[in-house]
Image: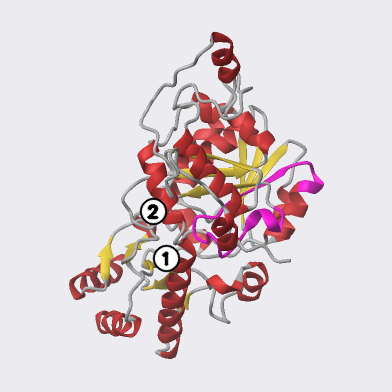
């Protein structure tokens, strides 16, 4: 039976302390105990259901973690204060000095900077590959490779990762597959396809309101226990805890994610097809001419569509900036970074969210300086939105 992430969340039963239909919000940094022995056991992570200090664990974050684990079909999850905290904590938990990582050269700029500039200082080697070229991935494997890291759909070039094949390559050498699923929550369920760890920037589609920054790590009980170990757990010792009020807010928004993803996808599909009819080159996985269209179809939970992200190449920065200004003035949406908002957002990736990637690498991977990335919103009249875009173009 095919896994349904929305139904999994719908079936989850969580109540407040006094029977509230929403889980109670924890407004405490520390927790009291009746006995010293219980405090010690809780500190060591041996008392299920007990809480010591909110950086370690707190009920509000636990509610959200349980819901995310349910959505991702993983045994457990851990909440962080940003998507980058989720990525960095998870990778640093797996890798030590002398280890090796394989990753996609096409990836979010912050992730690229961490992998390229920060990890080598600690003698962790990183190989950047074309993640759609499985032979290139295989050839990059080394005896000390600990993890293959990729995005389900890469940012910003929208390449689709073959998660089952990448999992097989990783597992055949004793490595793990970690997948950033920020672009495609519910659309793709990486764990069911073979991934070991799934990370998110919940700032984006999962929360959907652009009113907070948050992240998540979904994986096995064993891995989450390692992350939260008081002696050597990265998520424990680096301290990226999310405020409980934000956890509570995100948990409520999670229950409408399936509706929002369907609308984001529906609107993006319409704009992509309309661009194509106009003879304008558009990059969107939902179009049949996308290089990994069939792969995406084979991986996806089809009722949620192909996602809300698309891009158009205007070749140069001046044209891109002029186009985006006109769109903002026309009421299409906002010239802003990030994605997953209820209004359409657009930015020039090479000069914003991918600016950490050197210009020569951008050119090698096919990222034009005029590439405009759209995060298509929840517009009720998408035909009118497209007419505005077309007039600006």
Picture quarter containing residue 164?
bottom right
Q: Check disc 1 and report the residue beneath it.
A: 368
Q: Check disc 2 and report the residue beneath it.
A: 353
Toward the left, the furthest residue is: 329
Q: Can residue 255 be seen in this view?
A: yes
Q: Up-down: is 222 above or below 109?
A: above
Judged left or right of residue 356, residue 194 is: right
Tell me residue 314's x, y (percent).
36, 73
Tell me residue 4's x, y (percent).
62, 63
Which numbered disc, 2 or 1, marks the residue that appears first in the sequence?
Answer: 2
Span shown in magenta: 171-194
Which residue is pictured at 37% across the width and 27% down the height? 28
Toward the top, the furthest residue is: 36
Q: Is residue 333 magenta?
A: no
Q: Is residue 116 visible?
A: no
Picture quarter containing residue 37?
top right
């Amino acid at each position: 039976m095919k896994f349904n992430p929305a139904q999994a969340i719908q079936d989850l039963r969580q109540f407040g302390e006094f029977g509230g239909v929403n889980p109670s919000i924890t407004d405490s940094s520390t927790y009291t105990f009746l006995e010293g022995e219980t405090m010690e056991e809780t500190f060591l992570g041996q008392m299920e259901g007990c809480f010591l200090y909110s950086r370690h664990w707190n009920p509000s974050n636990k509610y959200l973690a349980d819901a995310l684990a349910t959505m991702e079909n993983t045994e457990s999850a851990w909440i962080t204060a940003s998507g980058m905290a989720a990525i960095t904590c998870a990778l640093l938990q797996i890798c030590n000095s002398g280890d090796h990582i394989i990753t996609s050269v096409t990836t979010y700029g912050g992730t690229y900077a961490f992998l390229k500039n920060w990890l080598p200082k600690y003698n962790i080697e990183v190989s950047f590959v074309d993640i759609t070229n499985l032979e290139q991935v295989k050839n990059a494997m080394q005896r000390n490779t600990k993890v293959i890291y990729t995005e389900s759909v890469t940012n910003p070039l929208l390449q689709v990762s073959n998660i089952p094949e990448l999992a097989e390559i990783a597992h055949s050498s004793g490595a793990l597959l970690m997948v950033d699923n920020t672009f495609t929550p519910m659309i793709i369920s990486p764990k069911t396809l073979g991934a070991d760890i799934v990370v998110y920037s919940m700032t984006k589609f999962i929360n959907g309101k652009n009113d907070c920054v948050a992240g998540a790590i979904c994986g096995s009980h064993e891995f989450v226990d390692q992350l939260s170990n008081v002696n050597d757990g990265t998520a424990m010792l680096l301290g990226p805890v999310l405020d409980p009020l934000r956890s509570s807010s995100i948990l409520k928004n999670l229950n409408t994610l399936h509706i929002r993803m369907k609308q984001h996808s529906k609107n993006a599909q319409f704009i992509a097809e309309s661009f194509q009819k106009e003879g304008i080159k558009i990059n969107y996985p939902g179009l049949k001419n996308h290089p990994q269209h069939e792969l995406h179809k084979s991986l996806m939970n089809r009722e949620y569509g192909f996602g809300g992200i698309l891009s158009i190449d205007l070749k140069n920065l001046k044209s891109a900036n002029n186009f985006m200004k006109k769109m903002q003035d026309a009421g299409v949406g906002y010239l802003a970074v990030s994605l997953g908002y209820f209004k359409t957002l657009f930015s020039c990736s090479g000069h914003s969210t991918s600016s950490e990637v050197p210009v020569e690498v951008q050119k090698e991977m096919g990222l034009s300086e005029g590439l405009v990335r759209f995060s298509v919103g929840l517009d009720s009249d998408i035909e009118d939105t497209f007419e505005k875009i077309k007039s600006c173009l």
